[in-house]
Image (cartoon, rainbow, N blue to C red):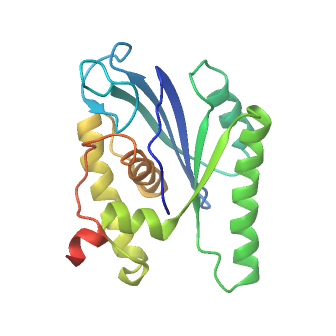
Amino acid sequence: MKVAAQDFGVHQRVVTIDPAEHVGVVRADLWREDEAAGPPLYTARTGPQLDGLRPRYGLDVKHWATRRGSEMAIARDAANKPYGGPLIVLIEGQYIGQDPQSAIRVVEARTRWSFAFEIADPTVQVVVIPAVTWTAGWLGLGSTHGREAIKIASELSAATAARALGIPAPKGDSADALNMFLWWLSHHLVGLPRRFKTAAERAR
């Protein structure tokens, strides 16, 4: 999956959803340096240059776990405050599998979240990120490593990032949502806190 770097302007909001039975949610506000509350600051990969330098951003990150039925409340809250560009929503594209009932649950969950945000903000940009993409690109693990290994690595990686960002360490699906967000954000900002090499780096 290719992600093109983009200019976030002064303020950009991004919501990340891991739509499992217990849903992991991350809401992040990216503030340009002149508006950010303080460090750490991360340099943008694109955007207007001032004295030959790209803009830098501070992150205000919150995470929590929720369940089915909270989609509209979370979407409306995320869309309620002003931000520069369109609201960006990242949703994990989970493996559907062979079991029809399991496939229906996965598709239904993704649809409910997508529709909720589209109702709350018709200009929303919904990005579906395959699970194998962010686990390989941020944790350095593929599906062959097994669910348990991926979960352990996800929580370790999220704890490392949480310390750097000054937030509580997330667990479970919230840790997955934070790592997926950081994988996506690494295509836009430089030097984000990470713990593991990517699968491509390990293969070298």
Q: Position of residue 74 (x, y in %)?
A: 65, 36
Numbered circles on residues, count: 0
Residue 90 lies left or right of residue 41; in this view the side is right
Q: Position of residue 174 (x, y in %)?
A: 46, 50
> Taking 138 as reference, is 185 above or below it?
above
Most extreme residue toward the front, as rendered? 52
Most extreme residue toward the top, as rendered? 34
Q: Residue 202 is drawn in which quadrant?
A: bottom left
Which part of the image, by quadrant, shows the C terminus? bottom left
Judging depth in this view, the residue of 30 and 54 nearest the camera is: 54
Residue 23 lies left or right of residue 183; in this view the side is right
Judging depth in this view, the residue of 104 and 4 nearest the camera is: 4
Residue at 40% x, 80% y: name it. Answer: 146
Residue at 44% x, 50% y: name it. Answer: 184
Residue at 71% x, 40% y: name it. Answer: 117
Q: Position of residue 171 (x, y in %)?
A: 40, 53
Residue 128 lies left or right of residue 143; in this view the side is right
> Taking 177 as reference, is 6 above or below it?
above
Q: Position of residue 106 (x, y in %)?
A: 68, 67
Residue at 48% x, 53% y: name it. Answer: 3
> Taking 19 as reference, is 150 above or below it?
below
